[in-house]
Structure formats: C-alpha cells, structure tokens
Image (spheres, grey):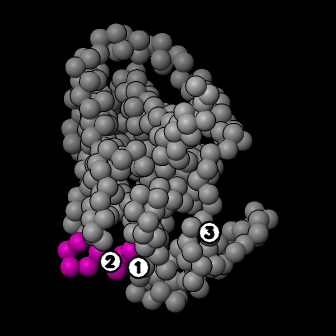
C-alpha cells in the first residue's frame, strides 16, 4: 500500500493559502455589521464585565487546548510513543489553522506529518491524525442531543427550529451509521467512501485518486481497532475535557457579563451551533453560522440580546480567532521555519 504521507497533501505553508483567511475575515466583518446597533447597546455590558471571570474564561480555553494535547499524547502512548503535553497542544492548534486554509484533509495531513516527524511511526501518526476529530465530534453530538432534549422539554423550539435541528441530528445519525458500517465491514465502507469522494470530486471538476480514500479508510479502521481492551478511555477523557473546558469558556464569559446561565441553557446554546458550524463547509470555522445560531438560541432562552452578542463574540475571539492566528505561528515553529531562518541568517 502506498505511503499515506505521499497520498496526503503537504502541510507546508504557502502565501496563497492565506487568501481564504482574508476572505473569512471579510465575511466576519460583513456578518457583524448588522450587529453594530446591538453592540452599541452592549457597551455598558462590556464596561461592567467582571474581569476576573474573563481571566477564568481565558484559563479554561488554555486548558481546552491542553486537553487536546493530552488526547494526542494518550493516543501515542497506546503504541508506546512519547509526546509532551505542550507540543500536543501546539500540534492541535497548528493543525486547526492549516485545516481552515487546506480543508479537513489538510488538517489531518498536518497532524500526520508533525507526529511522524516526532516519532517516525506512520501508523501512530495516522491514528493521531484521524482519532481526535472522531472523538471530539462524538462528544459534541452527545452535547447537541442533550441540548436539543432540553429545548424540547422547556418548549423553546419553534416548529421550524425543530425541523432544522431534527434534520441536523438525522444527518449526524446517518454519518454515525456509515462510520460503524466502515468499522465492521471495511470493504463495504471503502466502496461507499470511494463512490462518495469520486462524486464529490466530479462535482468540483477536480481530479480523483481513489488510492488516497482507500488509504484513509484503512488508517481509520486500524486506528479504531487499536483502541481495544479499554485503551480508548484516556483519549476519550481528553476529548471530553476539551469540550468541557471550551464550554466553561463560554460559561465564565456569561458570568462576567452578569448572566449566570444554567447548565441546561448552556448545553442548549452550545452544542448545536458548533455542530452546524462544522457542517457548513462554505464557511471556514463556521464563521457567522456559529455566532448567528448561538445568538438566536440564547435569545429564545430569554438571555438578553445585548449580553449574548458580547459573550458570543468574546467566546469566538478566545476559542477561534486568537487560536487561529497563534496556530499559524505554531505551524511555522513545528515546520522548522524559524530554525532555518535563524540558521541561514548572516552573522
């Protein structure tokens, strides 16, 4: 079988790849312009925020990325490989940023390349590239189902919202069935995956190489099978901690704004917007989708609009914009560009 590293795109940084980030920034400005009047009303909220709670929110977000580092380290320990917690967090942050400009495959390729450079083991690197997204999304689906159940119990879902969110959960359920099918019947999973990716490439008028899809499915199945005999517990704990600390970031920002939301309200407004953002492929990082859906949900849960706008924009600043910018710095560091520049610099 071909080397997966040859099949996946290179994570090397190219100047032109920053163009989508500029587009995202422009899109964010466009989407936020209608909120200017609300932001003006929210100035008093910002002025009176409890900054100790903001500091707690920042610490929670740092712990969220360290939990991702713990997850990566736990995955490597399954194969008796070592990775520091901090380097795992850096790789997670850098891969997320590369995924914004090169697609989710680019994010997986980046993790694969950096992990393989660290321990020279392709199978372990493949596992580190595929499992974190699977575990994180599984936890997010659980949070989304819990939040949707809460919204149904308090009758805060309109018929339109019920149809929309029901459709999202149905799609997630179908994806879960397809994943389980691929795990139990790899041949069927490979055939279906090749068919889907082939049709997707044809729609985009792009060349299609089935070998890369076959290699990815094989790596995915091998990675999952390696988690037998309870080895899945520590990586799953890292994924749960990652999501919990990310939710705590949002919670502490609500506390800072003077609105101590309940756990049910927090779940209801968190899970579904994040899942929708991941499914909105045309909007990198879910820009606009996450913010708009969160504001609408919290508004339906009687959270004042002036508070929710400030809190959600601050949450996205700490959980998306700053980590994205820092992720490009981390990518350059992990790629050795800083060291090469220093080495080639004239004395």
Give the quadrant of the N terminus.
Answer: bottom right
Q: Is residue 3 above or below residue 311?
A: below
Cβ–Cβ under 8 Å for marks 1 and 3: no
Could you tell me how far apart the alpha carbons at marks 1 and 2 are, in whole angstroms? 6 Å
**Sequence order check, earlier mark of 2 and 3:** 3
Q: Is residue 224 magenta?
A: yes
Q: Which mark is residue 226?
A: 2
For numbered disc 3, what is the local secondary structure? helix
Cβ–Cβ under 8 Å for marks 1 and 2: yes
> What residue is rendered at 49% in x and 66% in y?
171
Give the quadrant of the C terminus.
Answer: top right
Residue annotated with mark 3? 6
What x and y, as percent, mark residue 190?
55, 83
Residue 146: quadrant of the picture: bottom left
Residue annotated with mark 1? 222
Crowd rating for badge 2 (residues with CA inside 10 Å; few <14, some 14–19, many 20+): some
What x and y, as percent, mark residue 10?
62, 57
Residue 176: quadrant of the picture: bottom left
- Residue closest to the far front: 347
> What residue is rendered at 52% in x and 44% in y?
336
Please give the range of residues in magenta.
222-231
Q: Is residue 321 magenta?
A: no
Residue 16: quadrant of the picture: top right
> What residue is rendered at 26% in x and 36% in y?
60
Q: Can residue 64 be seen here?
A: yes
For numbered disc 2, what is the local secondary structure? loop
Could you tell me how far apart the alpha carbons at marks 2 and 3 are, in whole angstroms? 23 Å
């Amino acid at each position: 079988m071909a080397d997966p590293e040859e099949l996946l795109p290179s994570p090397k940084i190219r100047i032109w790849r920053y163009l989508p980030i500029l587009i995202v920034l422009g899109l964010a400005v466009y989407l936020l312009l209608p909120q200017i009047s609300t932001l003006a009303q929210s100035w008093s909220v910002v002025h009176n925020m409890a900054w100790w709670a903001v500091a707690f929110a920042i610490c929670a977000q740092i712990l969220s990325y360290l939990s991702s580092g713990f997850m990566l380290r736990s995955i490597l320990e399954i194969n008796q490989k070592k990775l520091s917690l901090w380097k795992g967090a850096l790789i997670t942050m850098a891969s997320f940023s590369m995924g914004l400009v090169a697609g989710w495959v680019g994010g997986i390729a980046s993790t694969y390349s950096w992990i393989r450079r660290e321990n020279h083991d392709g199978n372990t690197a493949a596992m580190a590239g595929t499992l974190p997204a699977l575990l994180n999304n599984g936890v997010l689906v659980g949070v989304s189902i819990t939040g949707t159940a809460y919204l149904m119990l308090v009758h805060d879902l309109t018929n339109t919202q019920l149809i929309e969110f029901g459709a999202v959960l149905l799609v997630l359920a179908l994806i879960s069935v397809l994943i389980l099918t691929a795990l139990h019947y790899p041949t069927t999973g490979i055939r279906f995956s090749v068919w889907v990716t082939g049709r997707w490439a044809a729609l985009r008028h792009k060349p299609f190489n089935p070998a890369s899809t076959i290699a990815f499915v094989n790596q995915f199945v091998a990675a999952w099978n390696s988690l037998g005999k309870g080895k899945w517990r520590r990586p799953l704990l890292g994924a749960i901690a990652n999501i919990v600390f990310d939710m705590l970031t949002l919670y502490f920002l609500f506390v800072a704004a003077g609105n101590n939301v309940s756990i049910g309200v927090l779940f209801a407004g968190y899970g579904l917007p994040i899942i929708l953002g991941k499914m909105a492929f045309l909007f990198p990082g879910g820009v606009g989708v996450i913010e708009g859906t969160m504001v609408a949900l919290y508004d339906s849960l009687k959270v004042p609009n002036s508070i929710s706008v400030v809190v959600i924009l601050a949450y996205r600043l700490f959980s998306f914009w700053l980590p994205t910018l820092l992720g490009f710095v981390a990518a350059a560091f992990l790629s050795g560009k800083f060291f090469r520049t220093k080495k080639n610099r004239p004395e």
